[in-house]
Amino acid sequence: EIVMTQSPATLSVSPGERATLSCRASQSVSSNLAWYQQKPGQAPRLLIYGASTRATGIPARFSGSGSGTEFTLTISSLQSEDFAVYYCQQYNHWPTFGQGTKVEIK
Amino acid sequence: QVQLQESGPGLVKPSETLSLTCTVSGDSITSGSYYWSWIRQPPGKGLEWIGYIYYSGNTNYNPSLKSRVTISVDTSNNQFSLKLSSVTAADTAVYYCARELIGSGWSYNWFDPWGQGTLVTVSS
């Protein structure tokens, strides 16, 4: 099983500021990584796949980078609707998810 | 626009079998380009992939759940289903169905879209 570790667990950010979320894999997953956003009571929504490709309809303020074992999701200027929990998922092997990073209002 | 909708009992007794169905609209489950997956999320916790089915009936399961999981497909009704046997309180979770694009070489991929999810509580 590939273990995905996200940091930090909680990120406090002011609206308009930049948020940087990290995801680490226990072994290389190449670029087979996706990011999701989940708001309370809702299903996860795909943001990024292939480590850096935005899904359809995702604003350009969301960007992904990394390969191998280290990945980053950056939200360039946080909007009110971006406060949520973010999960990474690897699909290089049978799918596993990180435990999530909660982005909260500072 | 493809939509997925989970349905099934919200309460299951310990040791019994959890059964859920996912109805797909806006896409044919036999299109051949997708796996049809189940994922769960215990309250306040992270996400766990349960398994997928291809329209032909081929399946693949999370090794940690494999002994208790069966996923089946009903192409005539554009549905697929999950059965999880011998449930315990640890199986209490929101269960999601999702579509997964098949990667090259029949590999895994990301999940998009997801159903809204259904909470299943295991309790006597």
Image (cartoon, helix red, strand yellow):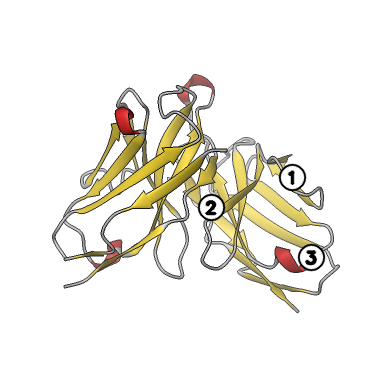
- In the rendered image, residue B3, in percent from the top left (x then y), is placed at 50, 43
Q: Which residue in the protein does label 3 denote?
A: A79
Left or right: B1 in relation to B55 = right
Q: Using the rendered image of the protein, determine whether residue A9 is visible from the camera's viewpoint.
A: yes
Left or right: B75 in relation to B5 = left
Q: Chain of mark 2?
A: A
Q: Chain of mark 3?
A: A
Q: Which residue in the protein does label 2 denote?
A: A4
**SS class, disc 1:** strand
Q: Amino acid at mark 1?
A: Ser
Q: Using the rendered image of the protein, determine whether residue A2 is visible from the camera's viewpoint.
A: no
Q: Which residue in the protein does label 1 denote?
A: A65
Q: Quadrant of residue B9?
A: bottom left
Q: Amino acid at mark 3?
A: Gln
Residue at the location (49% across, 31% down)?
B27
Inter-mark Cα distance, 3 to 2: 27 Å
Q: Amino acid at mark 2?
A: Met
